[in-house]
Image (spheres, rainbow, N blue to C red):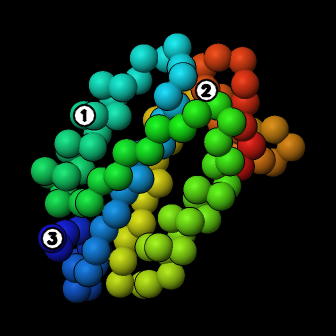
Amino acid sequence: MSSNYRPVNREPYSEVHCYLFSWLETDLRLDQDDIQLGRLLEIGFLFSVHHRKFFRDTNLKCDVDEILNLHGNDPEKLLLIYYVGHGYVTSGRMTLANGLVTRYKL
């Protein structure tokens, strides 16, 4: 499936992948946001959408590195990673909060 999204005067990307990250264990109740955004990107923009839900002890950096290796090295592919949740910046680094007590640094 090819997406038509690309700046004017450029050919469409050969592939567009969007990864939606969220937590399995959370008190934020963002499942509907994840589903609605995924549908919009799939239907409205013809993106390939991948939902990833993580356990509290998941090494997010390893998962992001894996995704970058799969889709991030080709200028003809567009890769979007969207975090469905809350976070904050400490010491110049993004920290993702799962809505419970545990926080994860990228």
Q: Tag 3 or tag 1, which sits nearer the N-term?
A: 3
Q: Are marks 1 and 2 in contact (CB under 8 Å)?
A: no
Q: Quadrant of residue 3?
A: bottom left
Task: Residue under label 2, please give it.
Answer: 98
Amino acid type shown at disc 1 = Gln
Q: Quadrant of residue 45?
A: bottom left
Q: Is residue 54 visible?
A: yes
Q: Residues within 10 Å of mark 1 (few under 14, many from 20)?
A: few
Task: Residue under label 3, please give it.
Answer: 1
Amino acid type shown at disc 2 = Asn
* Label total for image: 3
Q: Residue furthest top?
A: 27
Up/down of 102 relative to 73, above or below = above
> What kind of element bears circle 3?
loop
In the picture, measured across the screen, residue 57 lies left or right of residue 48, that is right
Q: Quadrant of residue 8?
A: bottom left
Measured in 3D between alpha carbons, the distance from the residue under mark 1 to the one under mark 3, in whole angstroms, is 20 Å
Amino acid type shown at disc 3 = Met
Q: Residue at x 22, y 85 (%)?
A: 11
Q: Are marks 2 and 3 in contact (CB under 8 Å)?
A: no
Residue 21 locus on image (x, y percent): 47, 43
In front of the other: 89 or 2: 2
Q: Tag 2 or tag 1, which sits nearer the N-term?
A: 1
Q: Residue at x 27, y 43 (%)?
A: 38
Q: Are marks 1 and 3 in contact (CB under 8 Å)?
A: no
Task: Residue under label 1, please give it.
Answer: 36
